[in-house]
Amino acid sequence: MIEIKNITKIYKTGEEELWALKNVSFKIENGEFVAIMGPSGSGKSTMMHIIGALDIPTSGTYLLDGKDVSTLSEDELADIRKDKIGFVFQSFNLLPRTTVIKNVMLPLVYEGMDKGVRQQRAEASLKAAGFDQSHFYHLSNQLSGGQIQRVAIARALVNNPTLILADEPTGNLDTKTGEIVLGTFQKLNEEQKRTIILITHEHDVAQHAKRIIHIKDGQIISDEKNHHQIKI
Ligand SMILES: Nc1ncnc2c1ncn2[C@@H]1O[C@H](COP(=O)(O)OP(=O)(O)O)[C@@H](O)[C@H]1O
Ligand SMILES: [Mg+2]
């Protein structure tokens, strides 16, 4: 489903050129759970932005379900993001003084769906993200860090994407809460066959995935099945 071929990303600031990705290639099949791991500045977020159709590479090709994303217009990129990809970021901004359920329904507002259907979809996503049902109508400013991250996952799921991209999703969480969130990704991968790409600088976090792509200075240094997967 994801085919990255000889991708290079160069950021130009004035005269300076920064090579964030250098001739990177890999494939990710539907239903995989992959961690992209590397130290700060290694090019992980750049990679995620390209995979997530938030940015295009300087050179190389990116095929998503056979379609060449590297050549698309802004509008076409926006459609791909909306239809195929759910994003989970490290710090997630919920609308304050707004209920959990409304926060999750937000991406559906523009879909022209009626309210009952939107509500059902949001409730199903919250359940899939393991969010406690008794808190669906709580205000978002009353939630803990772990609960906020589950709402973030629920919001990423509400468009029913096949691919979930998570950039340091446990970065702001304590170990125990982080494990719960990682367990949620495992469940979504195993029970719903969603493709998960987890970006992290932490070895312990990457160990929850089934495959680990290790990147350093914009290049892949290893890409292996994880024989030591931690199962939650
Ligand atoms: N928009 C940008 N403009 C210029 N340089 C950038 C930009 N985004 C990232 N970089 C640089 O590209 C390199 C890779 O960054 P990034 O992909 O954010 O790495 P990571 O997520 O692994 O920390 C870093 O040296 C970073 O400073
Ligand atoms: Mg980053």
Image (spheres, grey):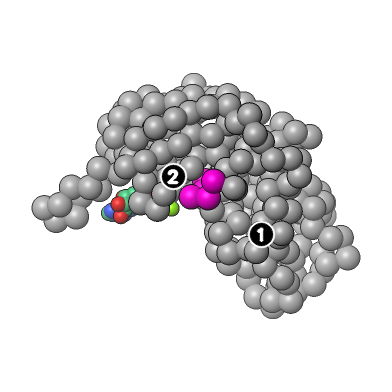
Circle nearer the N terminus (2, 1): 2
- Residue 223 at what x, y percent from top left? 48, 28
Is residue 92 shown to the viewer in this render? yes
Q: CA distance from mark 2 to mark 1?
A: 19 Å
10 Å crowding of disc 2: few (<14), some (14-19), many (20+): many
Q: Look at the picture and state if 163 lies above or below 155.
A: above
Helix, strand or loop at disc 1? helix
Say which amino acid is labelled 1: Thr
Residue positioned 61% across, 41% down in the render: 207
Work out which residue is located at the far front of the displayed protein and give it: 228
Is residue 84 shown to the viewer in this render? no
Badge 1 is on which residue?
Answer: 175
Instruction: Please state, as top left, top right, bottom left or bottom right, where the C terminus lies in the image.
Output: top right
Say which amino acid is labelled 2: Gly
Q: Look at the picture and state if 9 lies above or below 202.
A: above
Q: Is residue 42 left or right of residue 37?
A: left
Badge 2 is on which residue?
Answer: 38
Helix, strand or loop at disc 2? loop
